[in-house]
Image: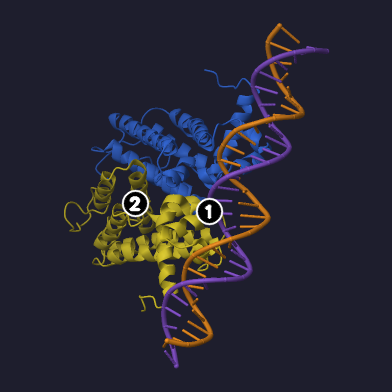
Chain colours: A yellow, B blue, C purple, D orange
Amino acid sequence: METTVRTKGERTRAAILEQAARLATMTGLEGLSIGSLATATGMSKSGLYAHFGSKRDLQLATIESARATFVSEVLRPGLAAPKGVRRLMAACEAFLSHVKRRVFPGGCFFAAAAAEVGTRRGPVRDAVAEQQRDWLELLERLSKEADELGELPLGTDPARLAFELNALLVAANTAFVLQRDPRTLGRVRTMIGERLGLVGGDEPRRPDARR
Amino acid sequence: METTVRTKGERTRAAILEQAARLATMTGLEGLSIGSLATATGMSKSGLYAHFGSKRDLQLATIESARATFVSEVLRPGLAAPKGVRRLMAACEAFLSHVKRRVFPGGCFFAAAAAEVGTRRGPVRDAVAEQQRDWLELLERLSKEADELGELPLGTDPARLAFELNALLVAANTAFVLQRDPRTLGRVRTMIGERLGLVGGDEPRRPDARR
DNA sequence: CTTCGAATAGCACGGTCGTTCTATTTCGGC
DNA sequence: GCCGAAATAGAACGACCGTGCTATTCGAAG
């Protein structure tokens, strides 16, 4: 797998997109203008524009860049944990961590993008919706794995659990961004931990009748 | 209380703001332009603009209008239910209903607005954040009332329950808008009903050891 | 019916937007 | 170090933005 970029053009292009993804979480994908992005990256408007055929292409490339960042900042560290409920918990913690560390200054890129382009149509919207689906399916897969290992309460529906977890994570992101209260992230981490039957340390507990 | 508007100016102003709130859920508060709003309301740009001193004022007035709509479409029907867990459930159902009925074409106005202006500062952001706080505090108050009536499981934290419910509602809104799947709203209604111990009909059940 | 203020329209402004064209600089293979 | 190609900059365009100014139309009180 080739991670490093070869030509200079690809390198600057990647740097532009990284900046674009960060900026887009504050101004929105539409509010992100070529001029402001050029200023932010220290380039001329046309020099920057030459890397993309149109603004739509820039938006799509920005989404792809944000997806890659999401993979390396959330998915990769999450999947590093041992299989089962701990991996599920690790994925949630990685999400909260990337919000707290302000990987994107406006919180989760896709939470912001989903709210913005959710009502439109076209490839930009589709790309955001697809990423949202993938993330939910991952949570569902991890939930199912944890369930099959018997680490979740009997009768737990993996799809429903995934929906609940995502709801809590996104709500934590929104509250953190909107109310500027960093304690929210810790509280939600606790809530999720209890929901998954992980109290205190990192040891999973066998489910019983009590919740 | 004076509900009807007196002068013609106030009437058209209210009509403009109603349209503005609906449009803003699709284009965003910033993407909402004076020209497009004028076209949508069949007015001239300057004729419309005369009702507001600036775009910021228009945005603030739009938020206030959306707040009023939210009150009459969600809070009022929700508070009509009998006190306790049924009122809490009714509030959640009223929220889901106003999303399903597309009171705002882009789903919940404040969910969209929060994601857009959450990172900025100034009075627009503050107004949105305040509405968000008020809504959460209402959910918390209703939760506390239900708890004091003994209709919730022992040891339930009203603030936490309110956070969970809001998270589920907003996630339902996002999924409905983004994935265009109307079944999501019904599923979340069921999830909330079970979470509150209301299964099948509308009768609250006494909490017991099982969840 | 008149009249005066309120409501709306017409028009123009500076600015920024996305986009294109052309010139200039910079890079990498020989 | 040269040279073709790739990368970047400069300038300009039409369109639309928010915002004022002035003229016109409308509505309600007398």
Task: Check contact, mark 1 vs mark 2: CB within 8 A.
Answer: no
| Percent coordinates x, y for residue A206 in the rendering | 20, 57
Q: Work out whether residue D2 or residue B145 is closer to the camera in this orientation and state it.
A: D2
* Residue occupying the point 40% across, 36% down: B126
Q: Is residue B4 left or right of residue A156?
A: right
Amino acid type, mark 2: Leu
Answer yes or no: is residue B106 visible.
no
Q: Work out whether residue A111 or residue A159 is closer to the camera in this orientation and state it.
A: A111
| Percent coordinates x, y for residue A165 in the rendering | 34, 53
| Percent coordinates x, y for residue C22 in the rendering | 61, 70
Q: Quadrant of residue A101?
A: bottom left
Establish if B93 lies above or below A186: above
Distance from label 1 to label 2 (Cα)?
A: 21 Å
Mark identifier at residue A169 = 2
Q: Which residue is mark 1?
A: B180
| Percent coordinates x, y for residue D14 in the rendering | 68, 55
Establish if A65 lies above or below B142: below
Mark identifier at residue B30 = none
Q: Work out whether residue B172 or residue A38 is closer to the camera in this orientation and state it.
A: A38
| Discs 1/2, front | 2
Q: Quadrant of residue A95?
A: bottom left
* Residue occupying the point 24% across, 37% down: B154
Amino acid type, mark 1: Arg
SS class of the residue under badge 1?
loop
* Residue occupying the point 27% across, 58% down: A89
